[in-house]
Amino acid sequence: MPWYLEFDESTSKFKETTKRESPDTILLVIDESQKKLIMSVPAHINMITRRAAERQARSIVKSGFLCSDGGRYGRDHELEILGEGGKLPERLLRSPREVY
């Protein structure tokens, strides 16, 4: 059974949720059968929020996530990030010297 975690921007931490899809928040699925963490990032999410969620997800890969049933899930899993949210803007990908 996969576990669904939602990223809470106010606390910068993941919390358990019953949502399977979310167009407004970052969602992390812990799939024990495939040993994967799948993080989906909606397009409107900014880079700072995405990086905070990514740091938390990498922390879960190292130590796991303590779920409500008392089990710790996600340790030593592969992290996969889906979605276009949080990418660097095009203007920051070019050198400032090319702009002038």
Image: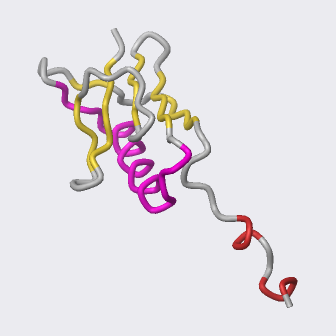
Determine the residue positioned at 49% across, 14% down. Answer: 34
Determine the residue positioned at 79% across, 74% down. Answer: 94
In reply to whether residue 60 is colored magenta, the answer given is yes
Q: Position of residue 7 (x, y in %)?
A: 32, 42
Magenta range is: 43-67
From the viewer's side, name the closer residue of 1 and 32: 1
In reply to whether residue 68 is colored magenta, the answer given is no
Above or below for 98 versus 54: below
Q: Position of residue 32 (x, y in %)?
A: 39, 15
- Quadrant assignment for the C terminus: bottom right
Determine the residue positioned at 41% across, 52% down. Answer: 55
SS assignment for the magenta stretch, majority: helix
Q: Position of residue 89 (x, y in %)?
A: 66, 64
From the viewer's side, name the closer residue of 7 and 57: 7
Q: Position of residue 20 (x, y in %)?
A: 38, 20
Above or below for 22 versus 55: above
- Quadrant assignment for the N terminus: top left
